[in-house]
Amino acid sequence: MKNDPSCALPLTRRRLLRQGATAALLLGSGGALQAAALQAAAPDFSLRSVDGPNLRLQEQRGRVVMLNFWATWCGPCREEMPQLNKLYAKYRASGFVLLGVNVDDDARHAAEVAKRMGVTFPVLLDTDKAVSHRYAVSTMPSTLLIDRDGRLRYLHLGFHAGYEDEYERQIRELLR
């Protein structure tokens, strides 16, 4: 996968069919969600953060939320982290929250890598992959933007230099 901009995860047709509408949203293009999933409520979840306490997505209602699914073994994920830190620093006072959902099996290793990379936003641990399955994540990184009402609005699969400009445009749109 030397030149691959994203890190694919195994995803079976049967699992996609079981995921229903959530899978449909992840089959959309890299920018906007497919029409059927646009405005759908983001599935709620609660995950432990590397700092210890659990964080529940529903508690973020009223804020614009970026969910970034990532793994320590994913090169594009590590490349994207400094850009995400900048966005988080720039917009967090305006009602923006960024949640990094790590899918590694080893929570300690994930916490160490996040610290070493200087991640400033909350990192949540999805070691059993329950949340990743719920969102039908098949590519690392996968980034979703959720509006203040808790509706899924944008999806980005993988990462290329320049995606951060599109993230910023979408964040600003949702913060208005």
Image (tube, grey):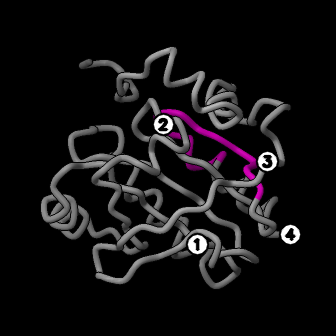
Where residue 6 appears, as percent x and y from the top left, is 39, 29
The residue carrying mark 2 is 137
* Separation of residues labelled 3 and 2 (CA atoms): 16 Å
Q: Residue 7 carries which label?
A: none
Which residue in the structure is indicated by mark 1? 97
Amino acid type of the residue that numbered disc 2 sits on in the rendered structure:
Val
Q: Which amino acid does label 3 sit on?
A: Ala
**Local secondary structure at mark 3:** loop
The quadrant of the image that shows the C terminus is bottom right
Report, in whole angstroms, how far the alpha carbon at label 4 lies from the one at label 3.
20 Å
Q: Quick one: SS at disc 4?
A: loop
- Considering only vertical position in the picture, is 4 above or below 36? above
Task: Residue 43: say if magenta.
Answer: no
**Residue 117 seen in the figure:** yes
Badge 3, how many Cα within 10 Å: few under 14, some, many 20+? some
Choose mark 2 or mark 1, whichever is in front. 2
Q: Give the range drawn in magenta.
A: 151-166
User: Alpha-carbon neighbours of circle 1 within 10 Å: few (<14), some, or many (≥20)?
Assistant: many
Tell me the amino acid under the disc marked 4. Arg
Q: Is mark 2 on a helix, strand or loop?
A: loop
Of circles 1 and 4, the one toward us is 1
Determine whether the residue tagged by mark 1 lies in a helix, strand or loop.
Answer: strand
Report the Cα–Cα distance between label 2 and label 1. Answer: 20 Å
The residue that label 3 is drawn on is 40
Q: Are marks 2 and 4 in contact (CB under 8 Å)?
A: no
On the question of residue 160 being in view, the answer is no
Residue 33's quadrant in the figure? top right
Give the mark nearest the N terminus, 1 or 4. 1
- For the point 70% across and 58% down, the residue is 146
Of callouts 2 and 4, the N-terminal one: 2
Q: Image height check: is 23 above or below 125?
A: above
Dot 4 corresponds to which residue? Answer: 176
